[in-house]
Image (spheres, rainbow, N blue to C red):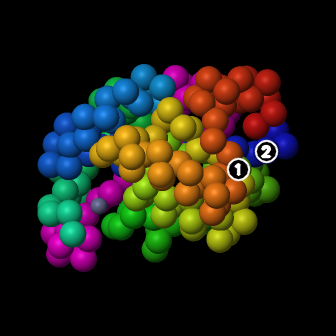
Amino acid sequence: MPERMAVIIIDMLNDFVTGDLKCDRAQRIIPNLKKLVETARKNGVPVIYCNDAHYPGDFEVHRWGLHAVKGTKGAEVIPELKPTKKDFIVEKRTYSGFFETGLDPLLRSLYNGEGVRTVVLGGLHTHICVRHTAADAFFRGYKIIVAKDGVEAFTQEEHEQGLRYLEYVYNAKLMTVDEIIKEVEKGSC
Ligand code: ZN
């Protein structure tokens, strides 16, 4: 697998989909992400969930209100995308999956220590946590693929602008989930 890919699913949590920070537009990406994680698992591509797990005093809470509090139902991955025992879970306390978490050392430890080369990003939201996670992936030299039908935002405009920004600034390759699945199944990941 020359691309040594890992699928990273960001904040597909109850609070983000149906709870305190509810985003109706998230519904449409659920079946796509389900296909993506199932294909990844079948083909030995690591699946990593980057999940908000807030303490009530976190600075971000002043911007968004209380959401995804560590240990609550709201901070759990939605049932449709429930992680399996083989998946990895990285808890985060602000937008980026890399910020003061173990994500980078985890990625470097995979593929028998050769490390992940390409991160495939899906989840919420295109212009917030996906963007900040992409930024930190870019700064660390990872190649980035964004599942363009596997990320969403509160509005179409935020989503589209978010995608353009990811492509323009972080050189992210925008692909549909079906296109990514084809690559994974070819074994070129
Ligand atoms: Zn948060």
Mark 2, other Cα within 10 Å: few <14 / some 14–19 / many ≥20: some
Instruction: Say which mark, if any, is on residue 118.
Output: 1
Q: Is 64 covered by the magenta stretch? A: no
Q: How many angstroms separate mark 1 from mark 2 (CA)?
A: 6 Å
* Residue 62 image offset from top left, x and y in percent: 18, 73
146 relative position to 156: left or right:
right
Give the residues in magenta: 35-62
Q: Is residue 85 above or below residue 64?
A: above
For the residue labelled by badge 1, is the local secondary structure a helix, a strand or a loop?
A: strand
Residue at (57% x, 65% y) in the render: 135
Instruction: Say which mark, if any, is on residue 81.
Output: none
Q: Is residue 101 above or below residue 84?
A: below
* Residue 107 image offset from top left, x and y in percent: 64, 57
Between residues 109 and 31, which one lies in front from this camera angle? 31
Mark 1, other Cα within 10 Å: few <14 / some 14–19 / many ≥20: many
For the residue labelled by badge 2, is the local secondary structure a helix, a strand or a loop?
A: loop
Residue 4 found in image quarter? top right
Q: Which residue type carries mark 1?
A: Thr
93 relative position to 103: left or right:
left
- Read off the residue under disc 2: 3
Q: Which residue type carries mark 2?
A: Glu
List the single residue furthest toward the right: 2
Q: Is residue 87 above or below residue 28?
A: below
Q: Quadrant of ligand 1?
A: bottom left
Report the quarter where the N terminus lies: top right
Q: Is 41 covered by the magenta stretch? A: yes
Tags 1 and 2 touching, CB below 8 Å: yes
